[in-house]
Structures are given as structure tokens and as C-alpha cells.
Image: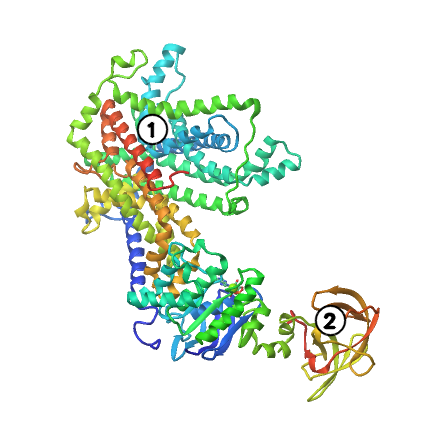
Amino acid sequence: MTDISHPGTAGRGIDRSRAIYWGVAALTTILVFGPITPIIFQAFLDKPLYDDTAVVTLGNFSRLFSEPGMAGVFFNTLYFGALTMIVAQVFGAVMAVLVGRTNLPGRKWLGEIFIWPLFVSNLVIAFGWFTMYGPSGFMTLAAKTYLGGAPWNLYSVTGMGIVAGLSQAPLTYLMCLAAVTKADPLLEDAARSTGAGPFRALFSVTIPMIRPAIIYSAVLNFVVGIEMLAIPLLFGGPSGIQTVTTFLYNAGINAAVRPEYGIVGAAAVILLIVVAFLVWLQGFLMKGAGRFVTVRGKASRPSTLDLGAWRWPAFLFVFAFAFLTIISIFGGIFMRSAVSFLTPLIPFWKVLTTANFEHVLGSANYVRSIVNSVLVATIGAAIGTFFILVIALVARRSDFRHSRALEYIALFPRSLPGIIAGLGFFYAVIWLPGADVIRGTIAVLILAFMIRYIPVGFGAIAPALAQVGEELDRGARISGADWWTTVTRIIVPILKPALFSCYALLFIHFFKEYVTAAFLYQPGSEIIGTTMLQLVAQGDNGPVSALATIQVVITAAFVIIARRVMGAKIYG
Amino acid sequence: MADLVLENLTIKYGSVTAVDNLNIHVASGEFLTLLGPSGCGKSTSLFAVAGLNHATSGTIRVGDRVLFDGNPNNTVPPEKRNIGLVFQSYALWPHKTVAENLAFPLTLRKIGRAERDERIKEALGLVEMLPYADRYPFELSGGQQQRVALARALVYRPPLLLLDEPLSNLDAKLRERARVWLRELQERLNVTTIYVTHDQAEALAVSDRIAVMSMGRMRQLGTPREIYERPADSFVADFIGSSNFFDGTMIENGTDKARIRLADGSEIVTPPGAAGKDGSVVVAIRPEKIELSSETGPNTMRVSIDQRTYLGSVWQYAVRSGPIEFRIQTPAELKEDSILVRIPQGHCAVFPDKPGAN
Ligand SMILES: Nc1ncnc2c1ncn2[C@@H]1O[C@H](COP(=O)(O)OP(=O)(O)O)[C@@H](O)[C@H]1O
Ligand SMILES: [Mg+2]
């Protein structure tokens, strides 16, 4: 029997649970703000960050705005983002309703195809579009030859926006599909029993139900558009069209020859503010979403709407979308990797070659980039899953005083565009004492990717955590377990499926990432994405498509294994 | 075994006071029930004893061990309190078998394998669940889960056992059997027990003493008989069993009795009681305590029968005398339209206001 005044029994001593709370909070804060802080400093300094004679100035911003063409860059960015969003929302939502709620022929396999693009980077997708629909692309040449002309021009902001929108439609599709299939069919039945026809019921009851999903994904796609690098780089580059991202990329890459630290910092800060505002707006718009929540405890079998005579026309429409924007893009990459020259004018078999793969596999650098990508994804996803798990446990399942603040900080990277995360880490490893040891290693890539995708992993773990009744923790605590024993012995075993899903999601995101790595890699730590960026810049399209094919194949193998063996839930 | 002392225990959530100045001394080996309607602060009080929520002020002591001394930053964490707790939802860990559920607290206490197995056997034997040791919780019925939860709370022999509505998820028949069994087990182990329920019949059946709570405050603390027969206020009179409430005016309030004029103009004699500022009172009397009478006299009134309801063991009649409507219960089947009833003075209670007004 001890008294409360005894040291050791008192609550607020430094027990190990509290040490973990503070340790995780400190680590998260350092990792999230570590890369942002130097960018903000740099934006207000007239000389490089590490120069001791630098003084505080607003000159960078005035210089940025007076720079000729800068207004155009900002306009391009916003227009491109808006167009991306609109195109993605329209096609994504329509596909979700058709696949999720009607008797469309082939809806099952079409639905599978729609999520393929989510597994690969938009660099791969952009390259696929370039291969098929670029000025000398396969489809373009085919259209010119057989139809007398190709009415599209990818090398314009509008063309880029449409391509980006079509390639982002799967994201909208995925989010709306969840809402559409979870919407309670009883509500639709109720509308029908009051005299509404089936289409009327769909439009007046179910569509409003998916409004939160549409709003949420709309803002998300706008952000994706604004921070996208691949499409503006591939299609805007040749015609001199710049967005904020390509401006930052070019300025950053060329920093050695033309030091523009200040302007880059200022542009990055503006991009950061815009994206942070959009993410805030997203949360704000979702606030009233509760009244639309129709998700019921038991998954009810969604009723399907009979399209009647429209079944086959609808199928043709959906199939055309899947074929032209997904199947042909992947097909184009695979075909290009197997030929010396891709054109509809010469029979395929006459140009078949293994040279592209030989080129890639024969080069130590390229092979290393593949190995590095696999290492970063395998190891990084494991470290990331553990780190995010501990964050989620402290944020949601502890009596840590600052648990809410920790969650805010951990989710802040939603507002952190990849290009800025990369730039920030680039500065940080120079700026933070001691950080130099990881410079140019895959460790810095893992760290940067991990920070960037905390929200993704958190989103996989937090809902599962919410399903675990708090009384299970309380039961363990009262049985004599401290916080850490409780979470490791009771909560984590129950969370196992969600942890596999988190690992799988992180693996996919880490494996396809390229933007964040663009400033961070050095010879020896290149990954598939950065090597592709390099090769694209040199116009080496054969090896690019071979690398892209290898990336797709490894991803596909991983997804199959993760789903079958680990039972991970990845996108439905 | 140990006694439990709560002194001036107050628990606030923002501006809401969930528990307001609770004072209870639970004797060693006693079975005390916290009884009150849903939301009155029973679970909050119980969890404060367990250390699973933070009290705002007051003292919590078990035996000679202070668990909370009024400083919210200085409480003993739940894992160091050595208290047994059974949750309403049982909170069995779904990934562990019955035996593993019981083994966990023992492992944490670094109890050796042989003794651990012995204790698990003993605890499962107590709750008659020995044959189910290797099952997972989802393979058990609700009643079985409840017993395993109890075994898990007892397996480390805590001096204090807390039960939060442990029977509320069982069906009515099973609940009645379980409460008898639970009480027998408690007496056998002689463990100090706090039992939380909103079911007054359950509370009356199992408790040594009952603390009746309402809106965070304790209204009365006493044996089941005291609570039932001498409710401290009209809330308790209404919540425990059921009572008729007559509006009236205090005419005379003596040391051993009072005279009260009722709304129909009649006068009755009652035990003394407090009146409101304007002299108004309510008289509480339980339906089954009202007697049929064959002759007029003090405290009798003639009533007409409005409605007859057969309740199985008794008949209930809705009756009226002028503006006063009330219920009586008697085993006799009455055919008359109008009868004479007597309000026994000793079973009346006089309060200044109606339940809900206080
Ligand atoms: N964590 C909490 N935050 C805010 N209010 C709470 C919390 N826990 C309980 N309360 C409030 O305290 C009051 C008592 O709750 P509780 O003890 O659960 O009642 P019951 O008697 O049904 O067990 C309720 O009004 C409830 O809303
Ligand atoms: Mg309760």
C-alpha cells in the first residue's frame, strides 16, 4: 500500500508512456516543420540561407511579381488546376454512378480498370499520353492517317488541363463510388414509393447524397492540378508554358547556374499558402456534411437502376472512356517499350526489339534506380506504418494533453505539395546541423516521402482505430497495463488488417513518387521516377517506357500479393 | 479487502457538472449500488474510482491508499490502482481466448506460469466457465461473456470490484438469475463492491445499501428498505417503486404528525414534513399501501373507479375523488363503481415539492 505522495505512483512523473507522447510529438513537429521553416526563411532573405550576411527583405516577393511572365505563370497554374478539377469531377462522378448504381454491362471489370491509374505516378500517365496523343503519338498519327486530322493539341494549357482532368477522374470515381454504394437504398425506395420514377429518384435522392464526396474530391483535384509536375513539364515545356510547379522545378534544378534562392522561396511560400487555404476550404465545406451521412452500420445491398434501352449506349460511352484514357495509355507504354519506333504506319512486329530493356538493365545507374525504388518503398512503408501508427495511437488513444495539436501537425502535410516538400528537405539537410549525413542517401528520400504521406497512412489507420471500442483500452488499463502495453498488446493486434492496408498504400505511394525526390536524389540515390525525369528531358523515350513498364509490373505484382496474401484493402 | 471513501467528489466536463460533491463511505465487504436514471453520473463516478476519468476535486481513498487527493495533476493511474472493473459491454479482448483474457492481468503482475494457470482455473470455476477456457469471446453467448468479464476482473484478487450495469445486456429472465448468482458470489468472496444500475428492482434485490443519484447529486443513501419505505425526497419516492402524489396545504405541522388539506377539501393526517414557502406540500403514498376500508374515519376517502387494469399478481385501479386522481393496487377484484379507501398515516411521506421540481 503506497501513498500518493510517493514518487513513482504519481501520474505526472516521467513514465515511459509520457516519454513516448512527447517523443512522438517532438519528432513529428521537427519532421513536418523542418522542411517548411527554411523555405519560409529563404523567402524573406536576400542571400542564400546558409550565408551569414543575409538580411531580411521583402524584395523576393516584389522581384517575383515584377518578373516578366510571372502573372502568366500564376494564371496558367490556376486555369490548369480549375480545368483539371472540372474534367475530373464530371467524368469521375458520372462513371461512379454508372458503375456503382446501374445495370451497366461489364460494370465489374470496368470498375477495376478505373482504379489502375491510382497505382502509378502521373509521370507514367503523362508519358503514356505523350506516347499516344502527343504530336507524333500513335493515336495522333492514326487519326491523321485514317480520319484526316487529329483535333487535339496537348501542348496548350487547355490540352494539358483536359489530360490532367481525365487522368485524375479515377480519384473522383473512387470517392464518389464509396458514397454511391454506401447511400442507403431505402431512401431511394422511399422516394420511389412517393411516386418518383427510378431516374428521378436517383437524381433527387442519391446524387445529393454524394455531394460531400464530390466537393471533397473537387478540392483535392484542384490541389493535385496546382501541384502537378509531370503534365506541365512534358507538355508545357516544349511550348514554353510554365506553371508554378515547373517554374520551381526549373529554377531549383538550375540553381547551380542561376542562383534564384529568394524568388524560389517566395514562389514556394505563395504556393504553400494557396494549397493550405484550399485544404482549409475543403474542411470548411465538409463541416455541414453530417446531414448527408447515410452510411449505415450494416452494409446494405445497393439497389441497381435499370438503364433499359440505354444499357448499351451507356456501355459504349463508359468503355470508350476506359479505353481511350486508361487502356490505351497503359497499352501505349507497354508497346513503346517493346519497339524501336511506335507508329500505326509500320506493322508492330517489324519494329519489335528488346533494346529498350537491354539499355535499362545494362546500365548500372538505371538498375540502381529500380533497386532503390524497391528499397525505399519496402523499408520506407514499414517505417512509415510504424511511425504513423504511433502518431494515431497518441493522437486518438492517449491522455496526452496535446493530442489534438499532434494530429493537426501530423495532417499538415496534406497542404504540403511534393515539390515544396522536396525543396524544403533539400534546404533542411543543409541548414539543420547534423542533417548533412543523410544528404543524397535514400534515407532522406524515405524521410521526405514519409512526411508527405502521413495523412494517407493516417486515413487508413484512424477509421479502423475508431472501430475499436475504447472500453478495450480501459479494460486493459484497469487490469494493470500502462498505456504502451495497452496499445501494443491489445489495440495493435486488433488493428492488424488496417496496418497491412496502411503498409500497402504507403508502398504504392513511395514506389510511384518522383516530385519530392527531384531535388533530393544524387548519383547513387536515384529512383525510377527521377531517372525517368532525366530520360524524358533527354528525349530517350524507349528507355523511359521500359522503366515505366518495369514500374507498372512491379506495382501490379505488389498489389496482387498485398490483396491476396496480406488481405490489404487498397482502393476498395 | 478494503473500504472505499469518496469525499466531496466533483467531476466537471467544461460547464457540465457530471458529479456534484459526492460523499460515500463503502465499508469493507459491502455491496453498494449507485442507482439513478440514465445520465445522472453513475458511470462517471465509477470510472473516477477506477482512474479512467479525471475527477475535478475531492478525495478518493481505498483502504489506507489515497488514489486521488483533489489535485487533478496528481492521480494514481488506473493500472496502479489494482481494482476490478466489469464494463457494460464486457470489453473482452476479441483477439484473446477466455483463458488469455484472464492471463493478461496476471502476466502484467509477473505471476509465474503455474500459479497463473491455477488462478485462471479458480476464477473460471467461480463463474462456471471452466469448459470454455479456449473459446474466443465471439463464440460465447451474452451471459457467458458477462461471466468471463467478471472472472477477468476477479482473477487478480482486487480488494475492490466495480460493476457498470453488468447485467443490462442480458434478457429479463437471465438478468434475474444472474443478479442472485452475482450477489452470492460477492458474499462468498467478501469483496467490496460498487454496482451501478438504473434498474431499481435490481438494486433493491442485491444491495447492502443504495445511493440514489439524480443529475450528478446523491439524493439518498440507505438500505433498500430505508430507500423504499422512507424516501428522502419526492424524487426518490417516485424513482424507487412508484408513488401517488397529492397536492395539498399544510394546516398544522407537529413533532410527530402533520395535518394536510388536500385539493378535494378533505384533510389527512401524515407524518411531519417540510412545506414549501407558501405552505403547499405534496403527499406521497404508494399504490399498494392504500387500503380498502369498510367504514369512514380519519384518512379515509370515497373514490370512484375510473379504470381497472389486471397486472397478474394484483389489480390496479385508477380512482378519483373530486380533482384528485391516483392509483391503488390490491389483489381483490372490485366490481363496485365507488369504494372507500384509507391512506395509512405511517406510509405517507410529505415533501415540499413534486419530483422534477427539485
Ligand atoms: N467525457 C465526457 N465529456 C462530457 N460530458 C460527459 C463525459 N462523460 C460523461 N459526461 C456527462 O456526464 C453526465 C453523466 O454521464 P454518465 O456518468 O455516463 O451517466 P450514467 O449515470 O448514465 O452512467 C452526462 O450528462 C454526460 O453527458
Ligand atoms: Mg452509464
Q: Nearer the viewer, residue B124 or A549?
A: B124
Residue at image coords 51%, 21%: A313
Observer able to see residue B211: yes
Q: Which residue is mark 1?
A: A125
Image quarter (top left, top right, bottom left or bottom right) of the N terminus of chain B: bottom left
Q: Nearer the viewer, residue A310 or A522?
A: A310
The reply to whether the C-beta atoms of the residues labelled 2 and 1 are less than 8 Å apart is: no
Dot 1 falls on a residue whose secondary structure is: helix
Residue at image coords 73%, 64%: B310
Name the subunit of mark 1. A
Residue type, label 2: Pro
Residue B289: image quadrant is: bottom right
Residue B3 drawn at (x, y percent): 44, 79
Dot 2 falls on a residue whose secondary structure is: loop
Name the subunit of mark 2. B
Above or below residue A470? Residue A505 is above
Q: Is residue B290 left or right of residue A110?
A: right
Q: How many marks?
A: 2
Q: Is residue A267 left or right of residue A531?
A: right
Q: Which residue is mark 2?
A: B331
